[in-house]
Amino acid sequence: MSADGPVVNVHVLFFAKSRELAQTPRSKVDVPSQIVASDLLDQLVTRFDLASIKDNLILAHNESYIENLSDKILFREGDELAVIPPLSGG
């Protein structure tokens, strides 16, 4: 099972290209209190039209990078989720 428990509201922050594609710097999203990271990513990609950068996205939960998309994430009401594409610079 990929999602369990009650639904909670989290703050999603978009950066760089993800912000451009989502057409917003932030959003509030209802998610299951427990969800596998890959399932969460799929939901975000669909909802915010991020398919073109899906394979390059990094997720961070409460300022901690999600290292493994097979990990289960435990959310609480008001948690923060950042959607970060790879950044380049010089």
Image (spheres, helix red, strand yellow):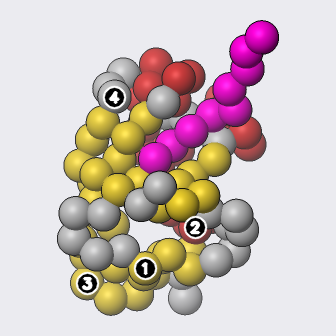
Question: Does the CB distance between marks 3 and 4 fall below 8 Å?
Answer: no
Q: CA distance from mark 1 to mark 4?
A: 23 Å
Give the magenta-colored segment's residue range: 82-90
Q: Which residue is mark 4?
A: 25
Q: CA distance from mark 2 to mark 1?
A: 10 Å
Extreme residue toward the front, this view? 90
Q: CA distance from mark 3 to mark 4?
A: 26 Å
> Which residue is at the front of the view, 63 or 78?
63
Label 4 element class: loop
Q: Amino acid at mark 3?
A: Pro
Q: Earlier in the sequence, mark 2 or mark 3?
A: 3
Residue 81 placement, left or right of 18: left
Q: Earlier in the sequence, mark 2 or mark 4?
A: 4
Q: CA distance from mark 2 to mark 3?
A: 17 Å
Q: Which residue is mark 3?
A: 6
- Residue 41, can we see it? no
The residue drawn where x is 56% and y is 80% is: 72
Question: Does the CB distance between marks 2 and 4 fall below 8 Å?
Answer: no
Q: Position of residue 74 (x, y in %)?
A: 43, 79
Numbered mark located on residue 37 in the image? 2
Q: Position of residue 39 (x, y in %)?
A: 56, 66
